[in-house]
Image: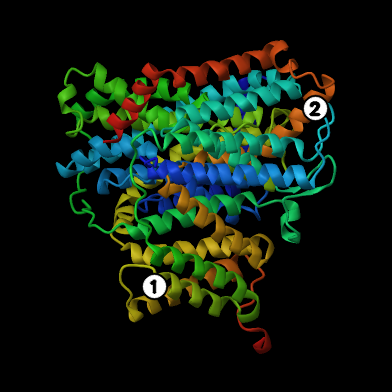
Amino acid sequence: MLKIKSPKDFWAGMMFAGVGLFFMIWAVVNYQMGSAVRMGPAYFPAVLGGLMAFLGLIVFAGSFAIEGPKVPTMHLRPLVMILVANIAYGYLMKPLGLVAATAVLVFISALGGHEFKWKEVTILYVVLIVFSVLVFVKGLTLPFPLWPDRFS
Amino acid sequence: MDIFSNLVLGFTVAVSPIHLLYAAIGVMLGTLIGVLPGVGPVATIAMLLPITFNLDPVAALIMLAGIYYGSQYGGSTTAILVNIPGEAASVVTCLDGYQMARQGRAGPALAVAALGSFFAGCVATLIIATVAPPLAELALKFGPSEYFSLMVFGLIAATVLAHGSLVKAIAMVVFGLLLGLIGTDVNSGVLRFTFGIPELSDGIGFVIVAMGMFGIAEIVCNLELKGDREVFTKKVTNLFPTREDFRRSWAPVLRGTALGSFLGILPGGGALLSSFGAYTVEKKLSKHPEQFGKGAIEGVAGPEAANNAGAQTSFIPMLTLGIPGNAVMALMIGALMIQGIAPGPQVMTEKPELFWGLIASMWIGNLMLVVLNLPLIGIWIKLLTVPYRFLYPSILVFMAIGVFSLSNNPWDVLVMAVFGLLGYICVKLECEPAPMILGFILGPLMEENLRRAMLLSRGDPSVFLTKPISGAFIVASVLLLLAVALPALRKKREQVFVEEAK
């Protein structure tokens, strides 16, 4: 059994090879190749995908030969909280309005930090929402709904 | 028109009160965000891009340039006072700047950084004004094969000069090129890689990718770090450098300016390479190399001048060729495209007021850095004491508003989150996101030029080698790759980065 000497390169190589192959195969199957003179929509992505897969394989193969650092531990909490907070903001903006969406963003993302104090975060939220409304909605006149639909 | 009348035109544009105001706002906002620990110029510009969308192109670009200088200076401030580099380029400033701060000489360090940068900025502005027009004229003669080869050269140079694994960096470039192809193919009208999602038919927004890869990923990474930072806030009392400081600084500033101006023009050069290079030069030339790393003012003056000169001359390939040399320039090109301007040599002839106005406002931006930032240094320092748990939700709010306002579509925010995840994974796997952004911007352009060149040559790929300019770019790219692949040189390259990063 081969031993993985460089886990970072192992996973990076897998990622590159996987993504490259995906782009290449998807392009070849779904779009026209054309010829070198008249390149079809598949030509460039297929070549690039192949190149990327090849580079990925080099990195992948190298991970068995060259010593490298471990992949640092992934801390899921900040990652998940930040991503969820952003996505929720995006999808709540239209139905609930800026005031509620910003609250969701601030409170969920604050949960991703090291410490969470209701009072602090609430003050931060109030400052941010007042600032957002004054600068972005009143000042730059961005067309954001402030409140949920049925109230306005 | 000669340089003089061009500069006059530029200054009449730049000193109009409204543009002065935008330059000032840009410099202030840039410093404000850039001073935050762990936030570099790329992230700063990505975060602030949306506020320039409503401006006219001249004002938008002037403001962005101001943001760039501001964020760089802000980064130096953080490097000196907190020992946290906002970006790779200010790693060097940390070495001696922070030591100076520990000795109670943060004031002189900050002042020398600002004055050195200002001097470098003045020189670099003149260099741009003289070099850019002939280069743009030359570039107007470029055909598709020359452009394609130039882009190949630019992308390869950018990866070779970046640190870390070369193969991974090239793979990231290709990844970016592929992502750039998502959307409608201009030639055939075919929807590529859209997977039936209507929002993808226009491709992925550049700003969204940049915000995710740099902004979101950076915040998540920062949240993982615990650890106290020691801020030298109370010790900044005497701002002014002594006569001795000036005596020791002027030569490094001159050398740094020269080195930075040159390296900045190279693709992949810019601020990072300039500051590393200048530090090494100063250490080699110094009579007291043992003082370096222990608070030598030369180690602040040289790299700071170089990094500002390099930051500025890296505008040259962007303005004249439409080719970004680094991630910041990729963002600038993205901003130009959003404003409906196709970057390239024709910008100078078709929009002289934009071109020369920007150059003039570079100088004004540098002046503002000195005039505004030195007196305001106390405020920036206060900002450093604000805990990160207040800062990052605020940054997120501004980013989310910015992204949502692009098209009032939640989809954009979702894509930003996806790229945030990708950026985070890339950081963990030591794959640098900057080459990817370059590829992303150049993807469609490269395909377009490749297609045209091959059509003109009737499918004969040798055209890239037989045309002199194009051939020279290809040969240069191959030489660069070979140079890095050679074991002896590779060791040297790794050594340089390892040594300096310590």
- Crowding at dot 1, Cα within 10 Å, few <14 / some 14-19 / many 20+, comes out as some
- The residue lying at 81 percent from left, 42 percent from top is B186
The reply to whether label 2 and label 1 mark residues of one chain is yes
Disc nearest the viewer among 2 and 1? 2
- Give x and y (percent) for residue A148: 63, 84
- Give x and y (percent) for residue A26: 71, 47
Q: Earlier in the sequence, mark 2 or mark 1?
A: 2
Q: Is residue A26 left or right of residue B251?
A: right
> Label 1 sits on what residue type?
Leu
Residue A36's disc number: 2
- Give x and y (percent) for residue B495: 31, 26
- Give x and y (percent) for residue B14: 59, 39
- The residue lying at 64 percent from left, 36 percent from top is A50
- The residue lying at 48 percent from left, 63 percent from top is B396
Q: Which of A45 and A114 is in front in this view?
A: A45
- The residue lying at 63 percent from left, 28 percent from top is B151
Q: Nearer the viewer, residue A126 or A135?
A: A126
The number of numbered discs placed on residues in the rendered structure image is 2
Would residue B57 be seen by someone viewing this image from the given angle? no
Residue B373's disc number: none
Quadrant housing residue B317: top right
Q: How far apart are marks 2 and 1 (CA)?
A: 54 Å
Q: Nearer the viewer, residue A28 or A125?
A: A28
> Label 2 sits on what residue type?
Ala
Would residue B491 be seen by someone viewing this image from the given angle? yes
Q: Looking at the image, is B483 positioned above or below residue B368?
A: above
Quadrant housing residue B383: bottom left
User: Which part of the image, by quadrant, shows the C terminus of chain B?
Assistant: top left
Disc 2 on helix, strand or loop?
loop
Disc 1 on helix, strand or loop?
helix
- Residue ID for mark 1: A111
Give me the chain letter of mark 2.
A
